[in-house]
Amino acid sequence: MQNKFKVNPNNKKLFAGLSLDLDNQWSYMKTHGDSGWEDYPSYFDFFIPQFLDELDQLKLKITFFIVGQDAALDKNKEALELLTKRGHDVGNHSFHHEPWIHSYSRGQLEREVLDTEDLIVNLTGQKPLGFRGPGFAWNPCLFAILVENGYIYDASTLPTYLGPLARMYYFWTSGLNSKEKNRRKDLYGSLRDGLRPMKPYFWLLPSGERLLEIPVTTMPVVKVPFHLSYLIYLGRFSEQMMMFYLNSAVLLCKLTGTSPSFLLHPLDFLGKEQVPELAFFPGMDLDRERKMRIFHKVIKMLLRHFKLVSMNSYAKTVLMNKKIKIIEAYHE
């Protein structure tokens, strides 16, 4: 079978998976250690319809990773139901959105996955096929639960060496005490994450079963991020520099035959004037109009070089490739 994920003489476009982690206002506040998150403030009522209109304009279908706590609240029901009604896929992003999920017991992990799955199915009519851990957190027990419950892929890894620097900046700007910082001590991963593969691979579980892993793509060779939040941050200083950076990432993906998994977040599209409570987040000093201009420039570039699809479609196509690396699943 021809490997669709390598540059070939026919110059066929590589695939690129598009996903959005549907983190809500309260989850950013909770992770940051801000008071008031317990009231579960939400921007879904205006963000989701606006963003779906943008996707329709671009004729794109993506995967939304939903947090169970949001699916459990009636005030979010109407907005979340729109996702599959408008033709998009949904994935599981845990129930409580806690980046220390990798330290949970098996029973806790089962509730995080299965309670969220039940809520997503009831709301959208679609069973999630993929999972992404909050803060790129995971462990082998989580993978076993996913396999047992019919998931075909995980998308929780970010192969970069910059995790410790991101964690340092996060702690510096947060209002967390030492106890809360200790709970988040593994947030964004370690230097060893930079050694993880860029391309999709199988986790080999202790049971002998396998689970497809689709990493959030970083720039091949140097392994620095180029998801949209990072590009917007660069765009604050110079959009020309941002586009040069993106061009470099695209070129290296094509040269290495890497089909990107490109990650979006709600704050990539929300302006400082819309959610002033999240002013601490990098890039939230920009207004929505400028962010949307950057988004369209980035998507235009990606569309020139890749066939953009949802993560479900991406995973199913990868599974047709019989030459996927297998890695034993363990956690440091």
Image: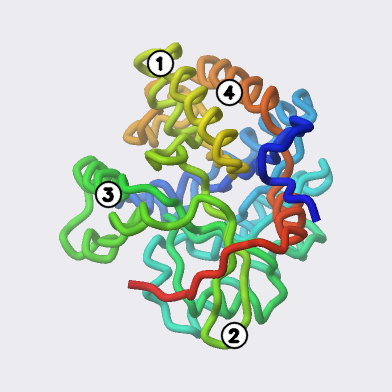
Q: Is residue 77 left or right of residue 196?
A: right
Q: Of the residues tagged 1 and 3, which is closer to the observer?
A: 1
The amino acid beneath tag 4 is Val
The amino acid beneath tag 3 is Arg
Q: Which of marks 2 and 3 is nearer the N terminus?
A: 3
Residue 316 in sight here = yes
Residue 45 x/y as whole percent: 64, 39
Q: Do the residues labelled 3 and 4 touch (CB within 8 Å)?
A: no
Q: Earlier in the sequence, mark 1 or mark 4?
A: 1
Residue labelled with disc 2: 208
Residue 135 x/y as whole percent: 42, 55
Q: Are marks 4 and 2 in contact (CB under 8 Å)?
A: no
Q: Which of marks 4 and 2 is nearer the N terminus?
A: 2
Labelled disc at residue 241: 1
Q: Which residue is drawn at 44% across and 23% down?
A: 245
Q: Residue at x 39, y 13 (%)?
A: 238
The amino acid beneath tag 2 is Gly
Helix, strand or loop status at disc 4: helix
Labelled disc at residue 167: 3
Q: Which of marks 1 and 3 is nearer the N terminus?
A: 3
